[in-house]
Amino acid sequence: MIAEHDVTVYQGDVREQLALLPASSVQCVVTSPPYYGLRDYGVDGQIGLEASPAEYIAEMVAVFREVRRVLADDGVLWLNLGDSYNSAPVGRFSGGGGALAGRDLSGHASSGVVDKLAASGLPAKNLLGIPWRVAFALQDDGWILRSEIIWHKTSGMPESIIDRVSKRHEQVFMLVKSSRYWFDLDAIREPHAETTIAAASRARKPYVAPGQRPNAKTRGMAEGGANPGDVWSIATQPFSGAHFATMPPELARRCILAGSPEGATVLDPFAGSGTTLKVARSLVRKSIGIELNPDYIDIIRQRIGQTPLDFEVTA
């Protein structure tokens, strides 16, 4: 097990709390920020209800510029973002508070703060392309964009639409600071498909020139399994607590295993219900979370199941 205080949670605004972390102090970042204009989490200072896509993207660039400062030179950032459509206003109810402030019972924002239809300047029903807009902006700010992974939601939420197909995926971007970085492909390899094994067994032996020794490895098959590729089919996992948008543990697990060695520190600057922190602890990593909404701190503690001795909260 990792030593005392293997999980630390900073409660407060991510833009302020990141400034408290030393430079190059984390090896891997796995996070899913609030998506643009989809939900109101009922907390002042939240990201996601900016007046326009451009303002949201500017906030993302500012946050992840600070993330880049605290990330090790050979560190990896895994950024999960969902998209949204041009629509009528969303935001808070005029009164009330608590975990459901500004949301209906499904957790979706309702009425009044963000008018995406007016803010984007695009005709109604446009898919805004927010994930790629953010990715390009981060690229322009100095990040190296290494991969776009498609998270295929095998149990995605149904949509009551009849004039387009239902959306069943989100993007996970892999970004790094430099061209040399920690990446453990072997940790996330998958079993070879039966068809691949059969094809390899039928393959002819390679030509061996006189005086050369044949290669003992089977052609076309990596030892330890196959590269998982850039489409990950992972079911969503609803969480019964107050946080509606939860990252599935399997998605966090793959990112953490590929992006960090045992004992490293993993950061989630938008900790939410604590999935990244919980998975990191199970994989023998230290973790740091930042969460604006104080209601979620107890949820994180309950999910991780730690005593006060090894769970540190900094406000």
Image (spheres, grey):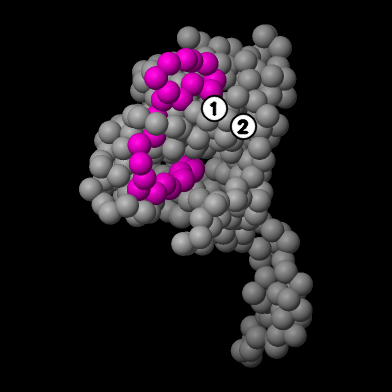
Magenta residues (range): 78-102
Q: Quadrant of residue 189?
A: bottom right
Foreground residue, 64 or 170? 170
Contact, CB < 8 Å: mark 2 with mark 1? yes
Q: Secondary structure beneath disc 2?
A: helix
Front position in the image: 54 or 209 = 54
Neighbour tally class for label 2: few under 14, some 14-19, many 20 plus, Cα within 10 Å: many
Q: Position of residue 257 (x, y in %)?
A: 62, 43
Q: Position of residue 105 (x, y in %)?
A: 57, 30
Residue 176 in view here: yes
Which residue lies at the image location 70% right of the left edge and 31% below the top edge? 282
| Residue drawn at the location 51% of the way across and 60% of the way down | 162
User: Of helix, strand and loop, which mostly describes the magenta segment?
Assistant: loop
User: Mark 2 or 1, which is nearer the eye?
Assistant: 1
Residue 247 or residue 157, whichever sits in front: 157
- Report helix, strand or loop for mark 1: loop
Q: State whether residue 24 appears in this view.
A: no
Q: Residue 275: give its label.
A: 2
- Res 147 label: none
List x then y, in percent, for residue 143: 34, 44
- As for residue 83 lying within the magenta part, the answer is yes
In the figure, 268 relative to 162: above or below?
Answer: above
Is residue 192 or residue 292 the one in the foreground?
Answer: 292
Residue at the spot of label 1: 272
Q: Is residue 108 above or below residue 137?
A: above
Question: Does residue 180 appear left or right of residue 228 in this picture?
Answer: left
In percent of width and height, residue 200 lies at 72, 79
Going by the numbered disc 1, the residue's amino acid type is Gly
